[in-house]
Amino acid sequence: MKLWNRSYELMELILKVYVYQDGKRPVFHNPYLRGIYSSEGWFMKFMESSKEFVTRDPQKAHLFYLPYSARQLQRALYVPNSHNIKPLSIFLRDYVDKIASKYPFWNRTRGSDHFLVACHDWGPYTLKDHEELTKNTIKALCNADTSEGVFVAGKDVSLPETTIGNPRRPLRNMGGKKISQRPILAFFAGGMHGRVRPTLLKYWANKDKNMIISGPMSYKTMSYSRNMKSSKYCICPMGFEVNSPRIVEAIYYECVPVIIADNFVPPLNEVLNWSAFSVSVAEQDIPKLKEILESIPMKRYRMMQNNVKMLQRHFYWNRTPVKYDMFHMILHSIWLSRLNQIQDLTGTQ
């Protein structure tokens, strides 16, 4: 049995999470289940309703969940076009100070056994007005950028970014075509924000018939998903931030992800070997993209594509959580982080 399977089984056997009931809606306890930031909402929905993991007795808790939504925080407090997210970080600072003064649990570990789950791009930046919140808590963030001084690789958790169009059918339109029916070498379509995507278009838009690299493509015509399902490799470049929902979309459509985002920690990297089912391309190597992909032997590509299909289940938001699915895997990564903290403190092997 793999080592992470053992920690997973231990999690299912003993883990208990205390969910703070403080905080008013919509910022707290109000999961938003649609769109590209929906991971934080789906996790909140399942965490708060879990009979398996939630305890009402904080004395029995191994972990403490701060049940707020970074997306709802942005919607409630950000003044459009103000370019000022300070009110959001002050709001979280005051919330944590209230938790720390009302309960004894934060102060026992300075927040090290507390965790938050935030998929909005601003998730890391809204933490900066509270030192312990920034440095000590286990942060599950879609914006898992090691260069900005908030996300700490090995302690924090890279949260998969998933686009949910219909919350009643989160797994609709899954799957892809057989390898023999994937004539496109590489595909990307999307907005031109950030530093990477304009470079990608500069070198590859309309340059090669085997590579479809373009600006935005309509979801409504289904041409976007159809191209992903017909491509061997799906290009997943960063936007304004390092994270991209295309990584999980590629996995859903059984297309090998090609990640172009320096300093990005991929989701579930504590337990998944990303080199076995994806390709990482340095931003400076975009001009050599086709050369890099064509140099991969077909035998290795088949192995990667088969691995993508095998691990799909870890990235599913099922309407009711299922063993080893996205909810359980995120919680396991948080749990594993805490176990590693304790091991480091005690010096045990």
Image (tube, rainbow, N blue to C red):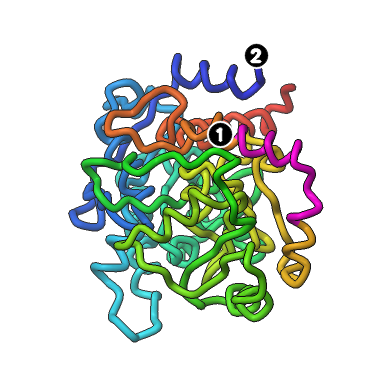
- Side (left or right) of 230 relative to 328: right
Q: Which mark is residue 40?
A: none
Toward the viewer: 89 or 266?
266
Q: Which mark is residue 1?
A: 2
Q: Position of residue 127 (x, y in %)?
A: 46, 62
Magenta-colored stretch includes residue 304:
yes
Q: Nearer the viewer, mark 1 or mark 2?
A: 2
Secondary structure under tag 1 reads helix
Q: Position of residue 217 (x, y in %)?
A: 41, 69
Toward the viewer: 317 or 300?
300
Q: Main secondary structure of the magenta part?
A: helix
For the record, the magenta segment spans 293-307
Task: Identify which residue is drawn at 56% across, 61% down.
Answer: 187
Quarter of the image where one finds residue 180: top right
Say which amino acid is labelled 1.
Arg
Q: Position of residue 32 (x, y in %)?
A: 25, 52
Secondary structure under tag 2 reads loop
**Mark 1 Cα shell of 10 Å, populated few (<14), some (14-19), many (≥20):** many
Say which amino acid is labelled 2.
Met
Instruction: Report which residue position mark 1 lands on.
Output: 338
Q: Is residue 98 above or below residue 83?
A: above
Quarter of the N terminus within the rendering: top right
Toward the viewer: 130 or 187?
187
**Mark 2 Cα shell of 10 Å, populated few (<14), some (14-19), many (≥20):** few
Magenta-colored stretch includes residue 348:
no
Task: Identify which residue is drawn at 65% across, 40% down.
Answer: 277
